[in-house]
Amino acid sequence: MTQQAAAVPRAGVPHGSETPHDSRGRRVVRRLPWWIAAAFLVGTALLWVFPFVWMVSASLKDNMEMFSGGLNLFPKDVVWSNYARAWNDAHFGRYLINTVVITVVTVAIVTIRCATCGYVLARYRFGGSRIFMGVLVATLFVPTGYTIIPVVKISMQLGLIDSLTGMILALSGGAYVSAILIYYGYFRKIPRELEEAAVVDGAGFVRTFFSVMLPLAMPVTATVAVLTFITTWNSFFLPLVFSFSRPELRTVSVGMQAFVGETATDWSGMAAAGVISILPVVAVFLFLQRYFVEGISGAVKS
Amino acid sequence: MSQSVVPSGRDWKRSAWIWLFLLPTVVLYGVYTLYPIIASYWYSLVEWNGFDSHQRFVGLANYQQVLKDPFFANSFKITLLFMVLVVPARVLLSLLLAVVLNSPRLPLVGVLRSAFFIPVVTTTAIIGVVMRFVLDPATGPVNSVLQAFGIDGVDFLGSQSTALPVAAVLYIWKFFGVTMIYWLAALQTIPHEIYEAARIDGASVRQIFVHITLPLLKPFLIIITVLTVEETFHNFDLMYTLTGGGPYFHTEIIEIYIYRWAFAASIPQLGHASAAAVLFGLLVAVVGAVQLWGVYAARRMRRSNP
């Protein structure tokens, strides 16, 4: 191989392709294009996350400085009172509690229902199981905008409109076909012997599932839980429609929208509200990003 | 699956458990996903304001009305236009980024991947509101920077020619990371032995990319394009908070059109909105059908590739 070809960056080539007798100087030269690429990408990445950094800085400025300060990131004086205003006056404390309650309960319901459903579909044949699967896959991409009217109507009939319970049920009743399919694929691959061993040990249907199969599917559960957490936390259309006549039921995303309508000038309070609303979900993502990325990757690989 | 021919007490018990395990999904999914899909068809055939229980059957009149409504045609056009603006940029640019970020030789790969991914996990509705301020013609920071260059008060979201492209750019930024992860997943299915072999044969970087990476990615191109197209149909959050469909309906996607007739009107017309929803559902289904065909073709392609 020629010198020149070796110095050019190669996409997707794994580590360890340097020959052992490479001198240090040569290695630095060879690495140089990568460092240049990295520097360029770091610049782009900073631009990419700039809106969030700006929002955090804006939440610490007073309104005057916010209008005059442009893209300047460092506030003259740090104004914490924006957070107090967002938390108390704009009710973001309450919205945050609503959002946490809705998200936690929805994640619990969705995880359980998708696990049991995926398990049964993967391990048992029963009348209609193929049709069941077919119907699920056919509704993989149903948009909220399509189902929203009947969802509201049926919630009204059940007396569940204008309530957190109604919101939670409607959110957990979404298709979540991909979650079921992830469980399905995982349970399918578990060897039959494990189940038979459990049966020999005297475990029934339920015990086999809860003490053998579900613990084995821990990574899938983590993935589904994280994906559902982020979707639910960020959901907007359903909570918007469900809290029309009861503002105290708003979630953070709906509250933000209303905030602009109510106080058109308090932009730094709004930035503080934005930080309160976005921070938890970003924190969850940073801690559990492995599971999130695995879940998304799974959509393409299967 | 081993199942005894004679149903015993155990089998009866087992099928009871099977159905009990399916019950939560059957009930929730049935009530909140399956029933609404079917009910939309019925609602689209009645005239109904949603307040009282009075529903008057009007047949296909709602469809006639919707199809005659220039604003529906407009929203249909906007939805498709938005798709055309967004999909190629998301699919192709994110491929370039993914190819670079797939290299373990690149320093800071983990940090970079997270940075490009962060916008995906943040709340779209909040991004919409914040961006409305950031792009404000009078007080927004972007315009105050532009002013320093002598450019005055650009109304990015308020002018009819820029609103949709600007919304598209924000949407691309927001969801770019998802497509990037799709591509990274696709790239990781290519075994590195193939690259090693090509390098030993003296292939250049460009040759490797054009003759090895791209052909092997072709089936994924179809899948990823379809996933991305389907995602662009779920854009209510950003559009509603960013522009609300304005200025003068220039960003009114179908979801906002449905919302306007069903919830934002002083007298809701749920029949009309439902007819629009059914037509929207048909659009999504047509794309879905193309998808099934595409995935099928992609599978065949993957099978013929060793």
Image (cartoon, coloured by chain):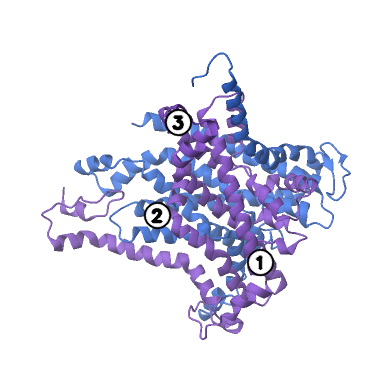
Give the color of chain B as drawn: blue
Q: Residue at x 45, y 60 (%)?
A: A286
Residue A52, placed above or below residue B95: below
Q: Nearer the viewer, residue B157 or A105?
A: A105
The residue wearing badge 2 is: B97
Residue B146, placed above or below residue A122: below
Task: Provide the chain ID for the residue under circle 3.
Answer: A
Q: Which percent across, then down, holds residue A173?
A: 65, 44
Side of A260 where B135 appears, left or right: left
Side of B271 where A87 appears, left or right: left
Q: Nearer the viewer, residue B138 or B112?
A: B112
Q: Nearer the viewer, residue A77 or B203?
A: A77
The residue wearing badge 1 is: A94
Q: Secondary structure at mark 1?
A: helix
Q: Which percent across, then down, holds residue B192?
A: 28, 42
Give the color of chain A as drawn: purple
Task: Provide the chain ID for the residue under circle 2.
Answer: B
The residue wearing badge 3 is: A198
Mark with earlier residue (1, 3)? 1
Q: Amino acid at mark 2?
A: Leu
Task: Provide the chain ID for the residue under circle 1.
Answer: A
Q: Residue at x 36, y 58 (%)?
A: B110
